[in-house]
Structure formats: C-alpha cells, structure tokens
Image (spheres, rainbow, N blue to C red):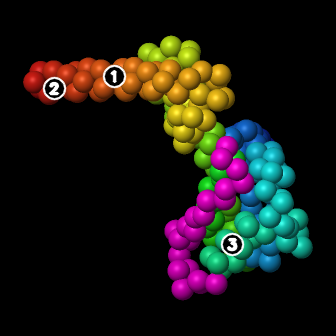
Amino acid sequence: MRPINEVQDNARKQMLFLQEIVENLDDGLLILTETGELVHSNPSACNICNQIKSFGLNDNSVPSVIWNLCKSLMKNKLDSDNLTIYSEDIVVSQSLIFRLRVRRFNLELSQQAYLLVTIENRYQSLKNVALSEAYKYHLTKREAEIWSLYRAASSYKQIAERLFITVNTVKKHIKNIRAKEQKFYEIKKGKEKMLESNK
C-alpha cells in the first residue's frame, strides 16, 4: 500500500491538473447554486458574461438571460435526472452569438444540487471549423479568410465589404472552395472504397 502522503499528493496533483484544464477552456463554464449564487466561473465565462451583461444581472451578478434558463430547468423538476439539458442561443450581434447549456448535478460531498452552465461562442466555433476545413481542403490564405466569414453566416455582400473586394470575386472564391471541398470528399471516398476492397 502507498503511504497516505503519496495518495494525498497524487490527489492534489490531479485536482490542479483538472483546474488547469477548466481554466483554459475556450467555452465559458459557470457553476451556480439553485439560489443563483456563483460558485465558480472560468476566465472565458467571465469574459462572455461581461459581453452579455447588457441583458441585465440577477442579485448575484449572473446575467439574467443565463439565470432565466437556469430557472426554467429548475421549474421542471419532473426531469429530476441529471441528464436533462436546457439550451438556448443568445444573439448579441452577428459576430457575438452564444449557446447556453444548463444542467443540474449533485456532488456526493454536498447536500444541495448545483447548476452547470456551459457557454459556447458560436461565432468562434464556426470560425474554428472553417479553419479546420481550410486546412483539409488546402485553401489559399484568401480563400480561408472568405470561407471563415462565409461559415460564420456572412453574406457575399458583407464579405466583399469587409475584405474590400467585389461580390463577383467572393462568388469566384466560393466556387473554387466548393470545388476543392468536393475534390477532398471524392478522394476520401476513393480511399474508403480502396480500404474496403482490401479487406
């Protein structure tokens, strides 16, 4: 058996490791009590809450749009299992769209239930997907820029204005991107067929 000090040291290291992960998540993470008291928030959540506080705050400085979703979840305690997740999108502007997800959870250490709120920056998520696709499809730097804006729901006109190019240039780039995308999936499909035939 390992000495108690070694077990405690390992537990402390694991706790610090988990804390480091939570603090560095891109998504915001809030833990609230059922009375709306803030127990923990990571830096991303603090940043996002500052951006949406114009919607108002509850008594514990939690944006009311978040607290209202939490209250909706708590009202429906018929779904008492901890698997129920309430979700809602908050649109601050075209480039500031957040997806909230709230679920209840219980800790063995505590008698009370808590609310876990995750806040995803949808614009940033779509931008990350677009960057990943740009790499997969071997897009040029300009195509990647256009694709990122297009995936974030910008219109051709908005893209053209933002990048100081014509709408026809945007259309031409999108057409080229779609051709590269199609080529990528044709190659992928060909490889999958080849692997299947080798089995």
- Residue placed most toward the observer, 164 or 23: 164
Rendered image quadrant of residue 56: bottom right
116 relative position to 185: left or right: right
> Could you tell me if the residues under marks 3 and 2 are in contact, i.e. CB atoms within 8 Å?
no
Of the residues tagged 3 and 1, which is closer to the observer? 1
Q: Position of residue 64 (x, y in %)?
A: 78, 69
Q: Look at 56% across and 17% down and name the residue there.
A: 142
Q: Position of residue 86 (x, y in %)?
A: 58, 68
Q: Which residue is mark 1?
A: 179
What amino acid type is highlighted by mark number 1?
Ala
What amino acid type is highlighted by mark number 3?
Cys
The question of residue 36 being in magenta is answered with: no
Q: Quadrant of the N terminus?
A: top right
119 relative position to 170: left or right: right
Q: Which residue is mark 2?
A: 193
Q: CA distance from mark 3 to mark 2?
A: 48 Å
Give the mark nearer the N terminus: 3 vs 1: 3
What amino acid type is highlighted by mark number 2?
Lys
Q: Which residue is mark 3?
A: 70
Tell me the magenta residue range: 75-95
Residue 143 visible in the snapshot: yes
